[in-house]
Amino acid sequence: MIALLWILAVVLIVLGLAGLVLPALPGAPLLFVGLLLAAWAEDFVYVGGWTLAALGGMAVLTYLVDFAATAFGAKRFGASRRATAGAAIGALAGLFFGLPGVLLGPFVGAVIGELTARRDLTAAGRAGIGASLGLALGAAAKLALGFAMVGIFLVARFV
């Protein structure tokens, strides 16, 4: 039974890390559940409630980082508030359209938002590019958080 829990935990952790960049998989929840199963496999002797609470908070933080980075990228390129909001809405809506939606959602949302604020296509394009760069930064930050979660778990388990 313990070996089965460990195998399932490792599979979920790997899928969770992949899901931090692949839109089809809910990365942070899979990663957290994998770490939770690994702690459970050892009856929470090495990894306890406080560590798991911190890991859960970091899992939630991955979602906040994703939206904030997209909005920050759009704002950095001179986007209006509408374009920033459009980038966040586009990122959320893009989740329902797989990889193309995740990649294009923030761009399209920022462009549409900017066009509702100003009728300048150049400014709208810059806002879209900023949102896309923010998306890339967000993915990097989510990966960093994911690997930090694994690192914290390993330190709690082995140190």
Image (spheres, rainbow, N blue to C red):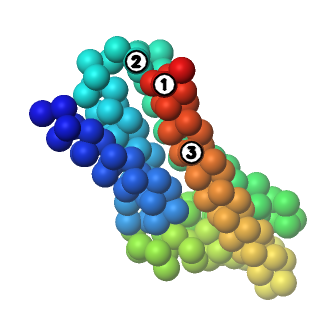
On the rendered structure, is 67 left or right of 158? Answer: right
Which of the labelled discs sits on residue 77, or is there none? Answer: none
Residue closest to the far bottom: 121
Q: Residues within 10 Å of mark 1 (few under 14, many from 20)?
A: few
The tag earlier along the polypeptide, 3 or 2, is 2
Give amino acid for label 2.
Answer: Tyr
* Secondary element type, mark 1: helix
Which part of the image, by quadrant, shows the C terminus?
Answer: top right
Could you say where residue 142 lies in the image, as x and y percent from the top left?
59, 50
Name the quadrant containing residue 9.
top left
**Residues under numbered marks 1 and 3 in contact, where contact means CB atoms less than 8 Å apart:** no
Q: Which residue is mark 2?
A: 46
Residue picked out by circle 3? 147
Q: Badge 2 local density, few (<14 within 10 Å), some, or many (20+)? A: some
Q: Residue at x 85, y 60 (%)?
A: 76
| Callout 3: SS | helix
Q: Amino acid at mark 3?
A: Phe
When the figure is inspected, residue 84 is found, relative to residue 3, above or below; the finding is below
Q: Decide: marks 1, 2 in contact (CB < 8 A)? A: yes
Q: Nearer the viewer, mark 1 or mark 2?
A: 1
What kind of residue is marked 1?
Answer: Phe
Q: Nearer the viewer, residue 7 or 72?
A: 7
- Distance, label 1 to label 2, CA atoms, is 8 Å
Report which residue position mark 1 lands on.
158
Q: Which is more N-terminal, label 3 or label 1? A: 3
Question: Where is 129 relative to 89, above or below?
Answer: below
> Viewed as shown, does residue 78 lie left or right of 150?
right
Labels 3 and 2 touching (C-beta < 8 A): no
Q: CA distance from mark 3 to mark 2?
A: 19 Å
- Camera-near label (3 vs 2) is 2
